Every structure is written in C-alpha cells, then in structure tokens.
Amino acid sequence: ATLIDKKKIVDRRTTDVMSDLFVRTLYYAIGVLITLSLLLITGIVFWRKHDTTREGLNAWIQCELTNAFTPDIYGLDVDCNAMRDPQTTVSPFWFMSWVIACVFAIIAQIILSFHVGARDRAAAVLSKQRTITKLMSSSRVSKGATNSSNIKHESADRQASMESVEEDEVQLTDIGATSTA
C-alpha cells in the first residue's frame, strides 16, 4: 500500500485511538517511574542501614538472651528496647514501600490496558449493574407492600413475565429443532 492509500485509511477515529494510546502510555510511564524510583530509594535505604542495623540487632539479641538466661536474683533485667540506638532501626515506611511500589505498578499496568474498547465494555457492564440494582431495590420495596391490590397486580405481572419467558424458550427450542433437522 502506498502512502496515499494509507492516508485514506487514517480518519478521526484512528487519530483518537492513537491519541488515547499516547495518553495511556504517558500515564503508564509516570507510574513506572514512580515505582522504580520508590524501589531504588528503598534499596538504597536498606543498603545504607545494613551494617548499623546488623550491629544494633546483635547487641539487642545479646541483651535479650542475657535477660532470658540470667537468673533474676541479681536484678539484672535490662530494658533492651531502651538501649537500642534509633540509627540502628529502619522506618516501617520502607518495609511498606515495597507494597506501595507494587500498587503503583499494578495501577500503571491497568491504565495501559484500559483502551477505548475496554472502557466502553466496562461502561456497559456498569450500566447493566445499575439497572439490576434498581430493579432489585424496587422489587424489595414492592415486596413490602401490604395493599392487597398491589400484591394482586404484582402477581399478575410476574405471571405475565413467566409466560413470556416460557414462550421465548419454546421459540428457541423450535429454532433449535428446525436447525438440526
């Protein structure tokens, strides 16, 4: 195909789809950069604190073992947590940052995967769910009706809808029988 033929193929919808892909790729790139930055910073924090954390844990473990295996008659029960230097610990945020980075990565991947067609399908599914929810809530409200005329009207409506469903099933069975014959 020549360039002129391809120019005829490109229309408004194609341009919109390409623009949408560009925007989604941009958001994906931002999400990936945030994820990788957070992971890199977390790795650097753990690497920098590794030696001091190990030394602090060795001293803390020795203190705890001394408390556990030394008889209490000398009154040597020492508060080991008070002896720990704050520089020998790692903030809990850096342990949670791995999970936060994974959440950013998952969101970035979802953004990249959620193209126009997928958004249209999701909107259709959500509108069907809203319709079903409205029908269920109106059904619950009507079940609570105490007026006998409402109950009779409701049962007549249900009977009519059941007959309609049975007629549809019969028609489908007839269509299936004629297509196999």
Image (tube, rainbow, N blue to C red):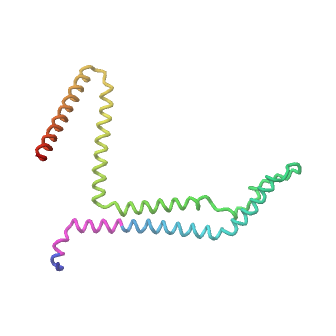
Q: Quadrant of residue 106?
A: bottom left
**Farthest bottom residue?**
2
**Farthest right residue?**
74
Q: In this view, does 79 lie to the left or right of 30?
A: right
Q: Where is residue 181 in the image (x, y as percent from the top left)?
A: 10, 46
What is the tally of numbered marks visible in this picture?
Answer: 0
- Which residue is pictured at 58% across the width and 60% down the height? 95
- Which residue is pictured at 51% across the width and 59% down the height? 100
Q: Where is residue 161 in the image (x, y as percent from the top left)?
A: 20, 32
Q: In which quarter of the image is residue 3?
A: bottom left
Q: In this view, does 80 lie to the left or right of 130?
A: right
Q: What stretch is highlighted in magenta?
A: 6-24
Q: Is residue 22 magenta?
A: yes
- Which residue is pictured at 30% across the width and 24% down the height? 145
Q: Is residue 107 magenta?
A: no
Q: Position of residue 124 (x, y in %)?
A: 27, 50
- Which residue is pictured at 70% across the width and 68% down the height? 52
Q: Quadrant of the N terminus?
A: bottom left
Q: In this view, does 152 lie above or below 120?
A: above
